[in-house]
Amino acid sequence: MKQDVRALSLDELRAFFIEQGEKPFRGNQVYQWLWQKGIHDFEGMTNLSVPIRALLETHFSINHIAIDTQQKSKDGTLKNAVRLHDGLIVESVLIPTATRSTACVSSQVGCSLDCTFCATARLKRMRNLNPDEIYDQVMAMDQQSRMYFNRPLSNIVFMGMGEPLMNYKNVVAAIDKITDPSGMGMAPRRITLSTSGIPKMIKKLAEEYPKFKLAVSLHSARQSIREQIMPFAKTFPLEDLLEALHYWYDTTKSRVTFEYVVWEGINDTAEDIDALVAYCHQVPSKVNLIQYNSIGDAQFKQASNAKVAEYQQALESKGIVVTIRNSRGSDIDAACGQLANKTQV
Ligand code: SAH
């Protein structure tokens, strides 16, 4: 099988051309086509001679993603079903607001974790995405944003399918290209990694990539409750998470955002609210109260607006910043927790 040309670094591409008796700057040209212009085939690399394109063809392939289907929500949100070279599918979502275009990107096919309220967790984890498969999703949505909204992407959130910190190496390799001035050149502070809370990997991220934004899917600050709805949390208890978040803040000076859904009968008591306020008090943080998007499980029901307001008041009275996020794209199953390749099933 031919090697995917996009597994090569710029230096390796230059070395390839030297080996072939060509000028090394050909490597820079190929790199630009691949990473700045997002081209999918060697034929389109028009500043290279025909024999050089043929040379590339005999040595390499380009395993580019293909957009299989696109669905558009009433609210303008665009969901892509993305076909990978081996036929597997992931989903990615472009979310426009008046001033911004946010790309919500997948990092795994399925997910390593087992959150009971999330549709993606019901798919088995098939594999990690490669760096270029992550990059391609971003590039495709950048093009869509330019086409539909006349502007480039403004933000990227790793809130699609999968747990980004369980595919750390490939996620950061993709982001290196996304932030590289010879790639898309996006500022790291416009990129948010959302994790269910893997303490060791949060520390590693703090050390290696302190400029990214971090979001943690908390959903309960009581260990006994969190374990019920997010069973993997037995392995990663709240105390260890807190310790890692201290490390994150000390290293990056950037506040974590806690993502939190309030469910009726699950985390809607005064005790739950107090636990969250106490947890937030221990580390500089903000809270994003997100709306539950139904995945057809009777066990989970969004709490009333009054309950959500109680949470908000309790947090704000202690000086903790709270935002209430309305869901986007739920009519096409594009909202948080709903990505499950339904159109393919
Ligand atoms: N695995 C990462 C990335 C996924 S982000 C993480 O857990 O953070 C997707 C966000 O949507 C997470 O905060 C997740 O907890 C939340 N979520 C999952 N299912 C949901 C649902 N049905 N309704 C609303 N939010 C949900």
Image: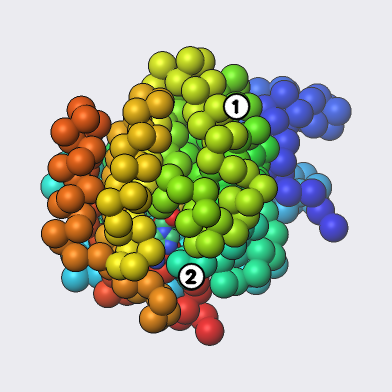
Which percent across, then down, holds residue 131?
62, 44
For the N terminus, give its image quadrant: bottom right
Residue at 19% over, 70% down: 74
Under mark 1, the amino acid is Lys
Q: Is residue 180 visible?
A: no
Q: Is residue 263 above or below residue 45?
A: below
Q: Is residue 228 above or below residue 2?
A: below
Say which mark, if any, is on residue 1. none
Residue 126 lies in quadrant:
bottom right
Quadrant observed for ligand 1 in the rendered image: bottom left
Under mark 2, the amino acid is Ala
In this view, the residue in front, 221 or 172, is: 221
The CB of the residue at mark 2 lies under 8 Å from ligand 1: yes
In this view, the residue in front, 166 or 82, is: 166
Relative placement, left or right, of 22 versus 143 is right
Q: Is residue 138 above or below residue 244?
A: below
Which percent across, then down, holds residue 193?
47, 39
> Helix, strand, or loop for circle 2?
loop
Residue at 40% over, 26% down: 282
Residue at 36% over, 24% down: 284
In this view, the residue in front, 13 or 265, is: 265
Q: Residues within 10 Å of mark 1 (few under 14, many from 20)?
A: many
Farthest residue to the front: give it.
271
Say which mark, if any, is on residue 203. 1
In this view, the residue in front, 322 or 49, is: 322
Say which mark, if any, is on residue 119. 2
Q: Is residue 193 visible?
A: yes
Residue at 41% over, 16% down: 253
Q: Earlier in the sequence, mark 2 or mark 1?
A: 2
